[in-house]
Amino acid sequence: MIDISNLSLEYNHTKTMALKNIDFYLTKGEMAFLVGESGAGKTSLINIIMGNIKPTSGRATVNGISLTNRGINKVQKVSLRRQIGPIFQDFKLFKGRSVLENVLIGLRVLGPITEEDKHHVIQLLNQVGLQDMINHKIDHLSFGERQRVAITRAVARKPEIILADEPTGNLDQETAFNILKLLASFKSNNTTILITTHATHLLKYFQGRVITLKSGQVSSDDYLEKEESR
Ligand SMILES: Nc1ncnc2c1ncn2[C@@H]1O[C@H](COP(=O)(O)OP(=O)(O)OP(=O)(O)O)[C@@H](O)[C@H]1O
């Protein structure tokens, strides 16, 4: 599903080697946390998988689409976008629009919105606890609530892959835990999930892979058994 092979990235203008010979494989339905200190290369790797930046060498194959330094064509780019539900560090939500509109905008890129789509979105907003805020403007929501809207928008598209870049940033411990739990719950749909996070103290409550990056390299790749319930 996500196959990273001998992947390296150098930012040309600064000569920063952000990623060095990265290798790992995520199968369909697998969940992995990507951890590491600030500057370790997590966002760079996510950006390559999303097709936003090209690797300098090596290959990332995402659901059959091969991402190399040669780049991808428009058709492949559209296909990649359809398969990935991205959750960005800064959410990329639309101010002045309601919670419902923000989620529907994410679906509109895939085609006309049907009544069934709307029904599904409202069900998801219930699931993430935003049922009473459906018509509230994004501007009036708390940080954690916005994060839940961003997650709903990503999963409403029924993506094959969820990529979440630091979804726990700037959240208190309880909200961060709830966000990770929410993301982990989509594993049951056979969705492949890759989450970057600094909240390593919360990972003991989850079961899944933990891939650690250190100075652009994979320093460990472990399978985590759930240690504690909460
Ligand atoms: N656009 C860019 N141009 C040049 N260098 C960059 C760029 N983006 C990131 N870098 C550098 O690449 C390295 C990896 O950065 P990256 O943002 O991928 O790390 P990160 O692990 O996501 O960090 P954080 O946890 O702080 O978000 C860092 O040394 C960073 O300074």
Image: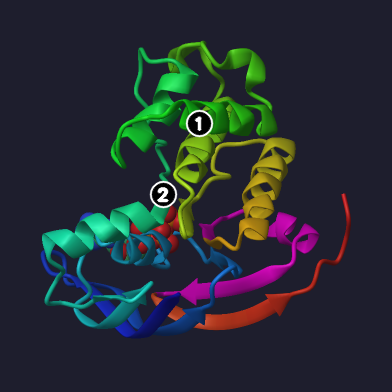
Image quadrant of ligand 1? bottom left
Using the image, determine if residue 25 lies above or below residue 143. below
Q: Where's residue 180, x and y in %?
A: 65, 49
Residue identified by numbered label 2: 86
Residue pictured at 63% horizontal, 23% vertical: 130
Report the number of discs. Answer: 2
Instruction: Please provide percent x and percent y for residue 89.
Output: 42, 43
- Label 1 Cα crowd, 10 Å radius (few <14 / some 14-19 / many 20+): few
Q: Amino acid at mark 1?
A: Glu
**Would you name the residue on which mark 1 appears?**
116
Q: How is the structure coloured here?
A: rainbow
Q: Amino acid at mark 2?
A: Pro
Q: Which residues are magenta?
A: 194-215
Left or right of 27 on screen, residue 103: left
Relative to 94, say whether 198 is above or below.
below
Q: Secondary structure at mark 2?
A: strand
Is disc 2 surrounded by few (<14), some (14 to 19) or many (20+) residues within 10 Å?
A: many
Q: Is residue 23 left or right of residue 74?
A: right
Determine the residue positioned at 49% across, 49% down.
158
Please name whichever residue, 207 or 39, is drawn nearer the observer in this view of the structure. 207
Q: Nearer the viewer, residue 168 or 149?
A: 149
Residue 162 visible in the shown view:
yes
Would residue 195 be counted in the magenta stretch? yes
Quarter of the figure with residue 60:
bottom left
